[in-house]
Amino acid sequence: MKRLFFITIVAFSLVACGGGNNNNNTNNTATTETPQEKQLNISILLDLSDRISPKINPNAQKNDVENIKTITEFFRVNMKRLNAYNAKGKIRVFLVPPPSNSEINSIVGKLNIDCSKMDNKGRKDVYDNLTELYAQNLDEIYKETIATSAWIGSDIWRFFKDDVKDYCIESDPNYRNILIILTDGYLYHEQSKYNTANRFAYLLNGNLAKYRKQSWKQLVEQNDFGIMTERNDLNELEVLVLEIKAENPNNKIDEDILPFVWKKWFDEMNVSRYEVYRSDLPANTKTRIESFLKSQ
C-alpha cells in the first residue's frame, strides 16, 4: 500500500512538472515574438519661406536635401524588409500653401509616391531611384523658389488647422503616419495673422521679444504664450521637426523658446509622438532622424 502511494505521488509530480515546462515554453515564445513591420506613410512639409534665402541661411538648401536623403533611405530599407510584393508605403512632399508657380507644382507632383497602387515593377523602380529622384527634384524646387519667390511665408499653422488629418493620416492601422517638417521654427504667412490673448497663429520677433530673458520658461507658462490650438485629434500622428534656427545670432535663446512652444502645441493637439531639433550638421541630424524613425 505504501509502495502504491509513493508511485502515485511520483507520477503526479512528473505530470505537473511537464505541464509547467510546456507553459513556460509557450510564454517564452510569446515574449520573444518580433512585432510586424508597419507600412510607412511619410509626409514631408517644406517651409519655403525666406529661411531658404541664401542671404539669410546659406546652408538651408543643402541641409534640407541631405536630411531628406536620410528619410528616403529609411523608406527604402522599409521596402526591403517588407519585400516588393508587400511594400505599400507612401511618401510625399507638401508646400503650404501650394505655390502659384506651375513649374514647382509639377515637380512636387513627381514626389508623390504611393506603392500601394503599383505593381512589383513599379515598386522596384521606386526602390532603385527614390533617393536620386528626391534629391534632383528638391534641388529644382529650391532653385526655382529662390529665383522667383516674394517670400509670402509658409502657412504651417493653417496646415495643421485644416489639412493635416486628411493629408497625413491613413485610417488603416497597418500604416505608421509620420509628418516631418523642415522649418526654422518661426511661423508666418500673410493670411494667418491671428491671435487670441497670448495665443498666436504666428511666431515672429514681435511676439517673441518679451520672452527673450533668462526666465523665459517661467514667463511663457505664466502668460500662457504659445500657438493657437484648433484641434486635439492627432493621436495617430508622429511629428519630427528639423532645422530650428534663430534668425538673428544675437537671439540664440529663440532656439530654446521655439522648440518649447512647438512641443506645447503638439501636446495640446494630442500628437502621439514628436521631437523638435535645432539645425545642425547633416551628419548629426542624420543620427537624430534615424533614431526617430527606427523607434515606434
Image (cartoon, helix red, strand yellow):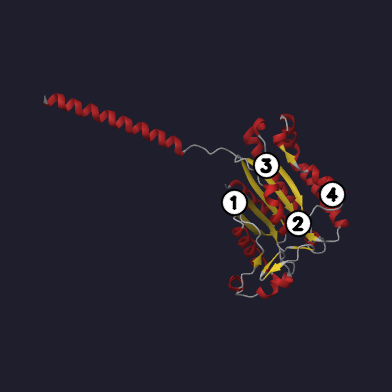
Q: Position of residue 130 (x, y in %)?
A: 74, 40
Q: How many marks?
A: 4
Q: Calculate the distance from the C-alpha at mark 2 to the C-alpha at mark 3.
A: 22 Å
Q: Calculate the distance from the C-alpha at mark 2 to the C-alpha at mark 1.
A: 23 Å
Q: What residue did someone put label 3 on?
A: 75
Q: Calculate the distance from the C-alpha at mark 4 to the C-alpha at mark 1.
A: 32 Å
- Camera-side residue of 249 and 11: 11
Which mark is first along the chain, 1 or 4? 4
Which mark is first along the chain, 1 or 3? 3
SS category of the residue bearing label 4: helix
SS category of the residue bearing label 1: loop
Which mark is first along the chain, 3 or 2? 2
Disc 2, disc 3: CB below 8 Å? no
Image position of 74 with respect to 150: above or below: above
Disc 3, disc 1: CB below 8 Å? no
Q: What residue did someone put label 1 on?
A: 235
- Nearer the camera: disc 2 or disc 3: 2
Question: Which amino acid type corresponds to the residue marked 3 in the rendered image?
Answer: Phe
- Quadrant location of residue 56? bottom right
- Nearer the camera: disc 3 or disc 1: 1
Q: What residue did someone put label 4 on?
A: 104
Report crowding for label 3: few under 14, some 14 to 19, many 20 or more residues within 10 A (C-alpha): many
